[in-house]
Image (cartoon, rainbow, N blue to C red):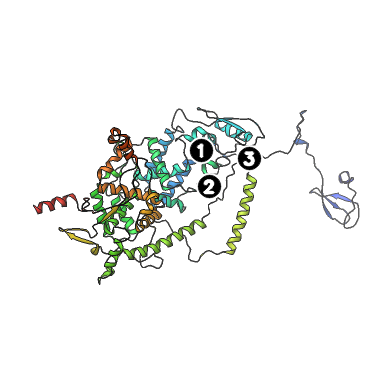
Amino acid sequence: MDDEHTAEYTVPCAQCSAVDWGISDEGRFYCRSCHNVIERTREVVDLSFLRLSSRVSTIRGPRKKQAERGHVWMVCEGFQFILKNQADALLELGVSPQFKDDVLCPLWRCYLQKSRQAYTHDPVRSCKFRVRAVGSDSESASEAISCTDGESNPASTAGSNTENSGFWSGSSDTLTYLSARKKRSQSLLSMKKTLALIYLALVWSREALTLSDLLRLVNEGHVPYLNAYEQLPEEMRVTGKDSLIFIVETVPSHHAVHKEAETIIQFLQLPAFPPVSRQTLLHPALLSLRYLSDVNLPDELHPWVCRLLEHTGMMDQTLHTFDPHNHPTLPRYDLQAAALIIVTLKLFFCLDDMTEWHLSNDLGRPKDSGKVFNLRRWYKVMEAALIQAQERRDQNVSRKQWKSKKQIYPNKKEKCSMIKKKRIAEQVQLCFEKLTSCPSGLQDVGPSSFIFCWGDEEKSDGPSLHHMKLDEVVTRRCDFLTPLNDMYWHPPLRRCLCYNSHYKEVEATLPRSFIWLLQLFAFMFDVKPFCLYEEVLSVERRIFDTRLYRGKSKADAGPSAEAAGASPEAQASLNTRTSPRMTRTSPRTAEVSLGTRASRRKRQRSRS
């Protein structure tokens, strides 16, 4: 039997030069004279695998390996997993479990029902498209998309049509989210709307997390957002055009998320939120105490902030609770509390680049000046801490890994180039890691509600000034304590009908100390200074002229009665922009007494 298979092989053995081959039990050739085994094997043909059929198949080219497909899923399912992961991250940070089960889940179901993505008899389904040409220049020219309602077999759309058209995606309804008509609507979810939903659930639950706290946790990576799609299950493959929906490269701003939250409230037609009472941590009375501690201001300043709240009527819980009928505006709790602190400091120190420094010079003379609050000393300590905090933030941003480890390729053409770029970037990063070393004192710090740390510890930002007294900046008049400063300046408080901030126009005329204070709180909240400036103006309108503040509702409804019946010249004067000139006035002449109404009545009775 071996001779039949070895007869055609006449190559001499490399060891003994003999031509006498045999076949071992393993089917390999060996030399019978010297027992040298070579790599040649016997060819075995198993006829049991042959099918007796007259059909002939021809292979015209190399076979392409079919891409492995996971579970057929929809985009809303992906966002549901992302919302769940974000909520779980907040629960680990100490948020109440009722936030997720009792608030966020019903809010998410309501959104799916209103947007007709689930819990409805008439759902919105994916789009139909046809292929015009195979070798077109652009993807937009290769397909014509037309959105339709009703069930259209999304599984077949994702499985067959996308492969032929080059519209490569993992979800079944990507086309619905990328169509021009749906992009203009408010029904489809986005990554920014996930943060807005989380924030609305936090406000409804009356948790102690403000919007600036939530965005800071997102920036620090404690709440998944930038690469949140990496935590999706394995069967939900995010590929191709899904990158346009799930990949984000920046964290949205405070203003953008707040505006998105108000849009969701209008879209869902939510009822009145639970009341934010004075005992709630979101109320400015308690929130201002937290910010006073964070910026190292004396604890004795908090009662004066509460007096300001009472005088302006902002202690009322209806002003801090969203109500579609009585108060249809979602308050910005963090900015509002900071604005109250700024106005209180203006009442005490004026902040006009002169008065505050004169008061600080006078405070340096007494013997017990170490126990009295000095604004100049506070400014020096705070300025040094602010510079260090800005450097830490810049270093953390520079060390942050923005690109995801699990990349999504928009289409198959760009896959090779993106893999090559990723490989080059990793090699360059390894080279830099070898050349540079991580600082010895650098360590991961857990999440905190405070930006600064004050005290005598080694890693603190400076000495604590919370115990300082305000005795030298207050005086007793008519048996009541009032600020020693009797002057107060403010920009024009008349509202502009264009509803745009004029901070850039008046910034050059504002005192530097006031601008620095705006920048300090803007750094803490990661917002633009003009946002805080508008909140300060809102508080000052309540102090000096309540009619200006009440005129907001008339302006929202349309032209005022005066403008409607006035002459064209008068209407033109009403539409002019606010002059950047500042107004100096006395708090007493403007009826800015920080005492309560009951105390004023008692004083009048005693005089009579």
Q: State the residue at coordinates (65%, 31%).
A: 133
Give the labeled residue for mark 1: 75
Q: Amino acid at mark 3?
A: Ala
Q: Is residue 604 left or right of residue 145?
A: left
| Circle nearer the N terminus (3, 2) | 3
Q: Which residue is mark 3?
A: 67
Q: Residues within 10 Å of mark 1 (few under 14, many from 20)?
A: many
Residue underneath mark 2? 230
- Please state which amino acid type lies under the numbered disc 2: Glu
Left or right: residue 60 versus residue 335 is: right
Q: Give the x, y percent position of residue 479.
A: 15, 58
Rounded to the nearest angstrom, the CA distance separating label 1 from label 3 is 20 Å
Q: Secondary structure at mark 3?
A: loop
* Mark 2 residue crowding within 10 angstroms, few (<14) / some (14–19) / many (20+): some
In three-dimensional space, the C-alpha distance between marks 3 and 2, rounded to whole angstroms, equals 20 Å
In this view, which residue lies farthest toward the left? 608
**Between residues 71 and 283, which one lies in front from this camera angle?**
283
Q: Amino acid at mark 1?
A: Val
